[in-house]
Structure formats: C-alpha cells, structure tokens
Amino acid sequence: MHLKLTSVVVLWWIALMHPFHISVMDAEYNNQSKSLQISHRLFLDDLEEGLKDFHGLDYIDTVEPENPEKLDSLINSYLQKKVFFVVNGEDKEFEFYGSELEGDARWCYYEIKSVETLKELEITNVALMDVFDDQQNIMHIKAKGKIQSYKLDKGTKVKTFTF
C-alpha cells in the first residue's frame, strides 16, 4: 500500500514539474453547407509561446489582448503555416473566423468550403511541435455519422481518414 501511494505521489509531482502539451481539434463535415467546420483548442500558455516564437515577439497576451483582432490575425497566420488539409486528394485552404477564450484555452474556428462529398481527409497538424518536443495534437473527425480520432506527435505528423 505504501509503495502504491509513493508511486502516485511521485507521478503527480513529475506531472507538475513537467506539464504536458496538447491541443484538440474537432472537425465535422456539414453535408448541408458542403463544408468542413473546425474548432481547435489550444492552451493559452502553449499558444502564447508558439505565437511569440513564430512571430518573433517578446510578449503577447492571449487572455486579455489589447487588440483582439490583431491576436486573431497572429493566430490565423500561425495556423495557416502549421495545419494543412487535403480533401479527396486536393489541397484545401481554410478560412479563419476567429477565436474565443474559454478557461485556460483559446478555441479557434475555421472552415474549409466547397467540399461536395468527403471520402478522404488528410490532416497535417504540426502546431506547437516546433516549440514543445512532447506536443500532442489530438483530432476528432465527424462525418457520415461516424467519429474517428487520432493523436499526432513528433513521430506522426500526418493522418489520413477515410469515410
């Protein structure tokens, strides 16, 4: 019993001393609008480091930005260079709509338009991987009534989903 308790305490201490880095992307194919609608959750401190590194900034406030439109512009340009989609064999760009604060994270919203049908979706998501060696980007894709999930990391940066 004592050994189990000690193990739990040590693991808890290690988790506090070495935080994990994760983002979560939820994508859903909307058959009515013929689009792929995406929300991407990035933790504030991780996003801050990524944006500072990418844009060469000394400081950025992702919680209460002085200019929210400027923050969204910085996030958009960052994501445009870190997240890529190939839909049915064709490279597709996304339109960034903005972001909002929720707790200790920022939700970013974007969409890929003109997707007549979704048969195959390849996603490359290297957001924050150049900043954190242990970065993991989890993806949940919903299409045709099914949900598929996958975790990307330094070893696997691309995943193809078929429907």
Image (cartoon, rainbow, N blue to C red):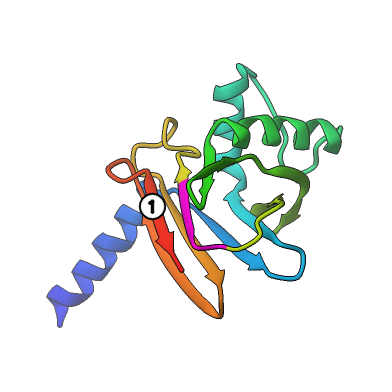
Confirm whether the magenta stretch covers residue 163.
no
Query: Is residue 117 positioned above or below 53 on the image?
Result: below
- In this view of the protein, which residue sits in the foreground, 114 or 155? 114
Q: In which quarter of the image is residue 10?
A: bottom left
The quarter of the image holding the N terminus is: bottom left
Q: Name the side, left or right, on which 105 lies relative to 139.
A: right
Residue at 53% x, 35% y is 82
Can residue 16 be seen in this snapshot? no
Q: In which quarter of the image is residue 68?
A: top right
- In this view of the protein, which residue sits in the foreground, 123 or 72? 123
Residue at 61% x, 30% y is 51
Give the image location of residue 12, x and y in percent.
Answer: 33, 62
Q: According to the image, label 1 marks what residue?
A: 159
Q: Name the side, left or right, on which 48 lies relative to 8.
A: right
**Range covered by the magenta-colored residues:** 118-123
Query: Is residue 84 positioned above or below 58 on the image?
Result: below
Magenta-colored segment: predominant secondary structure = strand
- The image shows a total of numbered marks equal to 1
Secondary structure beneath label 1: strand
Which amino acid is tagged 1? Lys
